[in-house]
Amino acid sequence: MIRVLIADDHAIVRQGLKQILAESSEITVTGEAANGVDALRLSRSGEYDVVVLDVSMPDRNGLDVLKQIRKDVPQLPVLMLSMHPEDQLGVRAIKEGAAGYLSKQSAPEQLVAAIQQVAGGRKYISSTLAEQLANAIGGGEAALHDTLSTREYQTLCMIASGKTLTAVGEALKISVKTVSVYRARLLEKMRMKNNAELTHYAIKHNLIDSST
């Protein structure tokens, strides 16, 4: 029996995932976390075989939680789940150590298959993500935001969403001075001059919800 920890801040999502997984005789959900702190605490307990981790957590970004789990419990596979499609965050998640990446738009049977696969020590890579990885590894044309570090990417998305440097610092739990350094670096890497250009780029590449 594969013991699964579900980490998602929405109770209705956790319940939906539990219902999907309940149909499998090989998988049981034995733990739930509503935030990054609880996800880290529970993942260290040794009671789980797979963590299904949402990218968007209220207290700590899912990618940060992923990196910490990889440090604390390197043998524990983490399957990232996100409302964003694979071509936005999938490659970044795999590079950070995720065992797989699934969009929340995926079919239920994909979730079951992904958990079974990563529990067996393999990666779960969708066809869309496989193409993105092939481009990244094989020297294909990479998007500008793929050249950013995780912190730089997070800063880009938050600035493009209209957050001030102070708000970005509070969200990432870093100083405003450090946020300014990340902003300067990502502007240089992306060959842009100001926040307006960053916002235009983020909307064009669907990195943020342009309706908000």
Image (cartoon, helix red, strand yellow):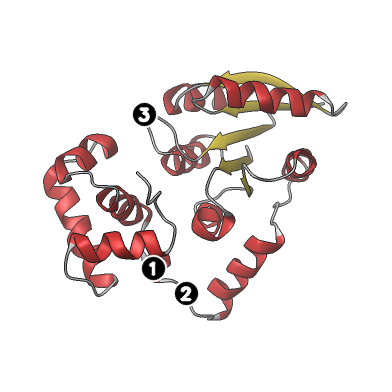
Choose between 193 and 186: the one closer to the eye. 193
Percent from the top left, x then y, of residue 15?
65, 21
Q: Which residue is mark 3?
A: 59
Q: Which residue is mark 2?
A: 142
Q: Which residue is mark 1?
A: 147
Label 3 environment density (alpha carbons within 10 Å; few <14, some 14–19, many ≥20): some
Cα–Cα gap, marks 1 and 2 = 8 Å
The residue type indicated by label 3 comes to Asp
Percent from the top left, x then y, of residue 164?
17, 44
Q: Are marks 1 and 3 in contact (CB under 8 Å)?
A: no
Q: Looking at the image, is mark 2 or mark 3 earlier in the sequence? A: 3
Choose between 103 and 179: the one closer to the eye. 103
| Residue 102 left/right relative to 117 | left
Cα–Cα gap, marks 2 and 3 = 30 Å
Percent from the top left, x then y, of residue 61?
40, 38
Q: Are marks 1 and 2 in contact (CB under 8 Å)?
A: yes
Give the residue at x 57% y 75%. 135
Question: Which element type, helix, strand or loop, lies under badge 1?
Answer: helix
Question: Which element type, helix, strand or loop, lies under badge 3?
Answer: loop
Give the residue at x 42% y 24%. 37
| Residue 115 left/right relative to 61 | right
The residue type indicated by label 2 comes to Ala
